[in-house]
Amino acid sequence: MGGIGHIYLRLHEAPEGDVWIDIQDTGKGMSKSQAKKVFQPGYTTKKRGWGLGLTLARRIIEDYHRGKLLVKESEPGVGTTFRIVLRA
């Protein structure tokens, strides 16, 4: 997030028993085109790094927990909210 920021976690139980975990930050946010690419291996906006963190997180959640990881919403200059959906 660079500097001082906040991260918020919210848990929701859907009527069918699924659990939604929303992770919201007050970072720099991203455009819609960036949000479409953020889970691609090697994609990064940083000078250093491999661009594998979100790719691996999504793979673990989908392959080992039968869930989903997605960008719920993001706005440049405001922050991003990711959602993890874990099936009942």
Image (spheres, rainbow, N blue to C red):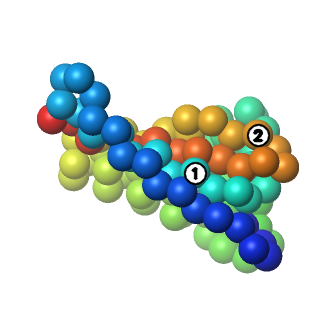
Is the residue 66 above or below the residue 54 in the image?
A: above
- In the picture, the disc for residue 3 is none
Task: List the residue tagged with mark 2.
Answer: 75
Q: Looking at the rendering, which quadrant does residue 30 occupy?
A: top right
Is the residue 50 above or below the residue 22 in the image?
A: below
Quadrant in which the N terminus is drawn:
bottom right
Front residue of 10 and 57:
10
Q: Is residue 55 visible to us here?
A: no
Q: Give coordinates of residue 31: x percent, y percent.
A: 78, 39
In the current view of this chain or complex, which residue is farthest to the top?
Answer: 15
Task: List the residue tagged with mark 1.
Answer: 24
Relative horizontal placement of residue 57, taking residue 35 as reference (left or right): left
Relative horizontal placement of residue 67, taking residue 54 as reference (left or right): left
Lower position in the chain sequence, tag 2 or tag 1: 1
Is the residue 40 above or below the residue 20 in the image?
A: below
Q: Is residue 23 visible to us here?
A: yes
Is the residue 6 above or below the residue 34 in the image?
A: below
Instruction: Count residues near mark 1 (Cα–Cα under 10 Å), then give few for <14, some for 14-19, many for 20+.
Output: some
